[in-house]
Image: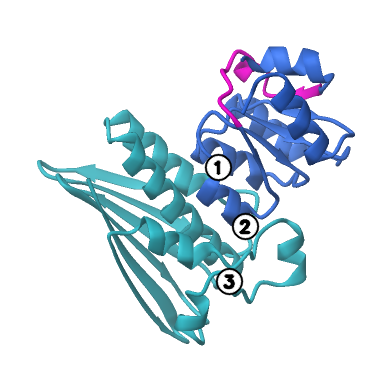
Amino acid sequence: MKITQIIENLNLELLSGDKGMEREIKGVYSGDLLSVVMANAKEQQVWLTVQTHINVVAIAALIDIAAIIVVENMDVEEETIKKSNALGIPILKTNKTSYEIAVELYKLGID
Amino acid sequence: MDKHQDDSKINLEYDIIRNDFKRAGEASSDIKSILKKIGIDSKVVRKVAIVTYEAEMNIVIHSYGGNIKVTIKSNNIIIEAYDRGPGIENIPLAMKEGYSTATNEVRELGFGAGMGLPNINKCADDFKIKSTPEGTRLLITINF
C-alpha cells in the first residue's frame, strides 16, 4: 500500500515531504523513545509518534522509515517540516491516538 | 568532513558539537549515504547507521564536544567516537539498558532512553570503551 492511500483512507493531514508520497509501506511501528525506535523499527514501516523534534526526521532517514505519522495533534516544529521536505520523508498528522491509527492501518491490511 | 581514499580504505571524519540538536544526526546521515553509494550491504549499513547515530547523540547530549571517524576497509568498518569529557562515571551502569543520566529536558524530546550504548553494543562485532574525566573513546568494529 502507498502513502497516498493511507492518507485518503485514514483522513490524515499531509504536512510535508510530498516527494515521498509514492513510497510503499510494509508495516507499522509505534514509539516515542528515539533509541528504542532506532533499534527496532524496520525499513518501509510507517512510524507513529508524539515526538516532533527535527531529530525524528534524521532517525527516519537513517533507518529508511517510509513516513512519520504524528499522533494526538502534536504541533510539528518548522525545522522538522523543512528537514522532511529536504529529505522527502512525509510527515502526516492526526488527532487520533497511536492505538487508533494502528488499528485503522491493520484494518486496511497492513500488518 | 575530510575524505580521502587510497587503494584499500576510505576515511571519514566529522566534528560533533555539544548541544547542537539541530545538526544532530547529520554526520550519521552522511556516513550512511556514502556507504549506500559504494554498495555496502544494507544490513551492515543499518548497523553502522545505528552505531554512528547513537555515538553522535551521546557526544551532543553528554559531552563537551568531540568527533567521529569512520574507516571503511575491505572486510570491516571501524568507527571511532571521541569526546573531550566529562567522562562516564560508571561504564557497567551506562551499558545497562534503561540507565541514563540525561536531563528531563532532553528526555522530553525522546532522548535519554538509556539505550544508546546497549544499541551500539548489539550492532558491534567488537566494542571497546574507555573513559576518563578528560574524555571518552569508543572503538567499534563492524564486519561485513
Q: Chain of mark 3?
A: B
**Letter of the chain in blue:** A
Vertical placement of B80 versus B83: above or below?
above
Element under label 3?
helix
Give the residue pinned by disc 1: A41
Location of residue B6 by image quarter? top left
Please identify which colour was used for chain B in the image: cyan
Mark 1 nearby-residue class (10 Å; few <14, some 14–19, many ≥20): many
Assign the N terminus of chain A to one quadrant of the image.
top right
The residue mark sitting in front, 1 or 3, is 1
Residue A89 sits inside the magenta stretch: no
Q: Which residues are magenta?
A: A13-27
Residue B62 is marked as 3
Q: Chain of mark 2?
A: B
Location of residue B111 by image quarter? bottom right
Q: Position of residue B18 (x, y in %)?
A: 58, 65
Q: Horizontal placement of B15 versus A88: left or right?
A: left
Alpha carbon of mark 1 to alpha carbon of mark 2: how far?
Answer: 25 Å
Element under label 1?
loop
Residue B20 is marked as 2
Alpha carbon of mark 2 to alpha carbon of mark 3: how far?
Answer: 11 Å
